[in-house]
Image: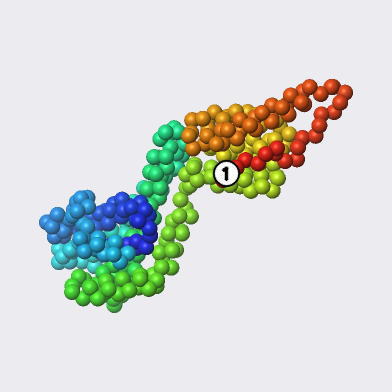
């Protein structure tokens, strides 16, 4: 039986749903498959040695997921009398479910290394690849939760069967009518927030090891550049914007603020190159038309500054560069 927490918005829940279906299906399949390999064909005869999600999802457990924030799949039946080594084989069968979720999580981390570089797939495909990356992250998190929560020694969770096989004098829990008492108890623990620290630890630990997408990295670096720009640390700001643009050369905001930071440093030629690029990219994006018009006006000021600098007599020193940009760009 596989519980899962769903205290999230509808959008988050829909993002988690594919990972939940994969996690539940593989979790229960692993129980059934391992039992079958060890000599108990009871689950195979019930059709549970299958990757078909409908073989494993419980109607009541699925409804509880959306109504209570807690759900479960159909438990896999096991007949210990079919095992050659009942205690050992029951332990392996019980561990197979959480182990399957760990394997899914490891696979997701490997897949993230491919999906994280969303910009290399092209401008048009980048938003879709970013969504795939987010789905993979959600799948990893949901399977981490499934793996850890099932190790708790509370019936009907797998931990109630695993730990008695490892600790002497403890009896494994089996199915029965009394299981509903424990299910109600788990629901109470979750609704009361008692298990929240467990979920929080799992989510934070998993998320801290997730490689961020290039989109996320670019945004973080851009924000750091903005902070430096606001403090008039223009050299530092340019360095941040250079880094952001090395990840995504089409990041309009980084180009925009690198241009005005270069103006602050007196680098009018470099600023003009960035302004031309901003205008070019903005024309292709209707939502950036206002930005395009703003930089057309800024280009006139920069060209005038360049003309004034080049037209001064050689004996007369050029005027000092402005200590801050001629105009502050608008927008976030």
User: Would residue 73 be found to the left or right of residue 69 on screen?
Assistant: left
Label 1: how many residues lie within 10 Å, few (<14), some (14-19) or many (20+)? Answer: few
Report the quarter where the C terminus lies: top right
Residue 123 seen in the current view: yes
User: Would residue 265 be found to the left or right of residue 51 on screen?
Assistant: right
Report the quarter where the N terminus lies: bottom left
Compare residues 195 and 317 and report the one nearer the observer: 317
Image x and y of residue 119, in percent: 47, 36
> Could you say which quadrant of the image residue 121 lies in?
top left
Residue 235 seen in the current view: no
Q: Residue furthest left?
A: 45
The residue positioned 60% from the left and 28% from the top of the image is 276
User: Would residue 197 be found to the left or right of residue 156 on screen?
Assistant: right
Image x and y of residue 68, in percent: 30, 66
The residue positioned 71% from the left and 27% from the top of the image is 304
Image x and y of residue 107, in percent: 36, 47
User: Would residue 263 be found to the left or right of residue 59 on screen?
Assistant: right
Label 1 belongs to which residue? 331
């Amino acid at each position: 039986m596989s519980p899962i927490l769903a205290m999230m918005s509808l959008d988050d829940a829909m993002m988690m749903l594919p990972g939940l279906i994969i996690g539940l299906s593989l979790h229960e399949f692993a129980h059934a498959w391992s039992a079958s390999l060890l000599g108990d064909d009871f689950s195979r005869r019930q059709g549970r040695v299958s990757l078909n999600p409908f073989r494993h999802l419980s109607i009541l457990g699925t409804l509880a997921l959306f109504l209570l924030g807690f759900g479960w799949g159909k438990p896999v039946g096991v007949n210990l009398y079919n095992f050659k080594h009942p205690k050992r084989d029951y332990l392996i069968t019980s561990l197979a479910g959480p182990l399957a979720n760990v394997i899914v999580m490891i696979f997701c981390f490997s897949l993230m290394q491919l999906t994280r570089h969303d910009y290399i797939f092209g401008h048009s495909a980048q938003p879709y690849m970013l969504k795939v990356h987010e789905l993979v992250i959600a799948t990893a998190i949901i399977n981490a939760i499934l793996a850890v929560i099932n190790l708790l020694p509370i019936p009907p969770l797998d931990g109630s069967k695993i730990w008695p096989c490892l600790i002497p004098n403890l009896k494994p829990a089996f199915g029965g009518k009394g299981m509903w008492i424990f299910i109600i108890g788990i629901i109470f623990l979750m609704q009361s927030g008692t298990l929240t620290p467990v979920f929080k630890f799992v989510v934070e630990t998993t998320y801290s090891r997730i490689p961020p997408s290039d989109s996320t990295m670019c945004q973080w670096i851009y924000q750091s550049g903005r902070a430096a720009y606001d403090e008039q640390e223009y050299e530092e700001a340019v360095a941040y914007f250079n880094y952001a643009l090395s990840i995504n050369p089409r990041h309009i905001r980084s180009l925009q603020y690198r241009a005005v930071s270069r103006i602050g440093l007196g680098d009018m030629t470099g600023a003009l190159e960035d302004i031309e690029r901003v205008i070019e990219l903005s024309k292709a994006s209707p939502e950036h038309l206002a930005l395009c018009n703003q930089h057309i006006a800024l280009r006139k000021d920069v060209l005038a500054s360049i003309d004034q600098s080049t037209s001064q007599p050689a004996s007369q020193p050029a005027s000092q560069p402005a200590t801050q940009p001629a105009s502050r760009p608008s927008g976030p």
